[in-house]
């Protein structure tokens, strides 16, 4: 998934020098006795990668015969606890749990299903699907089948069960087929769109969209908005937005989560936690370019206390801290 096409700009990188035992001892001291030192917990867990946090948890269990996640759960509370426990999850397992929550109650959260499944590449989807089976002893595909329907169901099922092609292809030919399936006829052949959007790689789709614009005189997104409706429309638009710029897509989603009367804390947490080791740095830049203010300023306006502090620490990342550490300064 990396390659030249993807933007790799994390805020959290492998922390060096890393000592799992020292970190485990610091966390134990932060939770031992009366009161909890939330600042120390934030300083450790938001400045280590997921793999390093997993190593800390193993060391914590070995040294103190205690489960780190259970201690954190008993010591913390509210949205602060939610962020910290999200950080402690394996990334694929965390997203599997989010997908389960989207289908677990009366009514299905299609927006969450679309956001997670329509933006991930084959390898990420495979890991999430495997994690889902491991946790819930059911296949993600079968669970989805009972929750969604129609062409939207067909698209998500294809994303879960097929791999995107990297073979040679003709972008003009694919664009022509899509035009003929939509604007070039009465009614819309949704199946043609589903097949193309699920089977071609993201770089290939980027070329297809360019050819489509030349052919139709409008962008692919404009065409989809005019030709489709409902969950399928949102899913195809999500793939199109992801193809054009993944960091911009997540920047827009972050803004939506913090706009309006109520903050969508679940979305805010999920986006910041899951993008931290991938492209959160790029997302921050896109956010500032789009809205002429920083993500951090909006987070400060929408959150508070330890919840605010932990999100800001993830957004800051550990690059600056590592530079200070190299120069001998304290952090």
Image (cartoon, grey):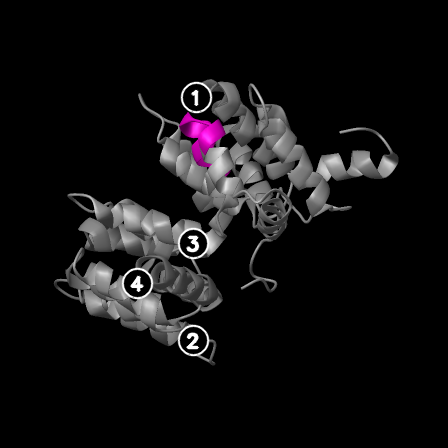
* Residue 145 shows in this picture: yes
Please tell me the numbered disc located at residue 302.
Answer: 1
Q: Nearer the viewer, mark 3 or mark 1?
A: 3
Foreground residue among 191 and 73: 73
Image coordinates for residue 272, horizontal then vertical, percent: 49, 39
What residue is shown at x 62% (from left), y 28% (from top)? 30
Please tell me the numbered disc located at residue 50.
Answer: none
Q: Nearer the viewer, mark 4 or mark 2?
A: 4
Q: Nearer the viewer, mark 3 or mark 2?
A: 3
Image coordinates for residue 52, horizontal then vertical, percent: 63, 49
Magenta segment main secondary structure: helix
Foreground residue among 193 and 303: 303
Q: Dot 3: within a 10 Å radius of its alpha carbon, few (fewer than 14), some, or many (20 or more) residues?
A: many
For residue 150, side relative to residue 174 (left or right):
left
Circle 2 is placed at which residue position?
Answer: 165
What distance separates the C-alpha of mark 3 from that of mark 1? 27 Å
Circle 3 is placed at which residue position?
Answer: 93
Circle 4 is placed at which residue position?
Answer: 137
Q: Nearer the viewer, mark 1 or mark 4?
A: 4
Q: Secondary structure at mark 1?
A: helix
**Picture quadrant of residue 152:** bottom left
């Amino acid at each position: 998934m990396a390659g030249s096409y993807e933007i790799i700009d994390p805020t959290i990188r492998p922390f060096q020098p890393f000592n799992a035992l020292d970190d485990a001892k610091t966390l134990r001291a932060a939770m031992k006795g009366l009161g909890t030192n939330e600042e120390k917990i934030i300083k450790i867990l938001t400045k280590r990668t997921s793999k390093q946090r997993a190593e800390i948890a193993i060391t914590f269990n070995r040294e103190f015969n205690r489960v780190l996640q259970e201690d954190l759960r008993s010591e913390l509370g509210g949205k602060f606890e939610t962020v910290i426990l999200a950080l402690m999850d394996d990334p694929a397992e965390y997203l599997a749990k989010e997908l389960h929550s989207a289908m677990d109650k009366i009514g299905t959260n299609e927006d969450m299903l679309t956001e997670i499944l329509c933006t991930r590449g084959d390898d990420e989807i495979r890991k999430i699907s495997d994690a889902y089976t491991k946790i819930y002893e059911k296949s993600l595909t079968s669970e989805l089948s009972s929750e969604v329907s129609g062409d939207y169901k067909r698209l998500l099922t294809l994303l879960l069960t097929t791999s995107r092609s990297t073979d040679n292809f003709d972008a003009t030919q694919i664009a022509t087929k899509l035009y003929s399936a939509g604007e070039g006829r009465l009614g819309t052949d949704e199946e043609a769109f589903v097949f193309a959007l699920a089977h071609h790689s993201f770089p290939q789709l980027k070329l297809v969209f360019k050819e489509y614009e030349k052919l139709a005189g409008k962008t692919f997104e404009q065409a989809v908005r005019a030709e489709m409706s409902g969950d399928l429309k949102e899913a195809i638009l999500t793939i199109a937005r992801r193809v054009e710029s993944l960091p911009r897509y997540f920047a827009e989603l972050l803004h939506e989560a913090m706009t309006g009367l109520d903050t969508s804390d679940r979305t805010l947490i999920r986006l910041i936690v899951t993008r931290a080791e991938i492209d959160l740095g790029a997302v921050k830049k896109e956010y500032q370019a789009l809205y002429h203010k920083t993500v951090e300023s909006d987070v400060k306006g929408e959150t508070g206390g330890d919840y605010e502090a932990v999100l800001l620490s993830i957004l800051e990342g550990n690059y600056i801290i590592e530079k200070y550490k190299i120069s001998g300064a304290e952090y």
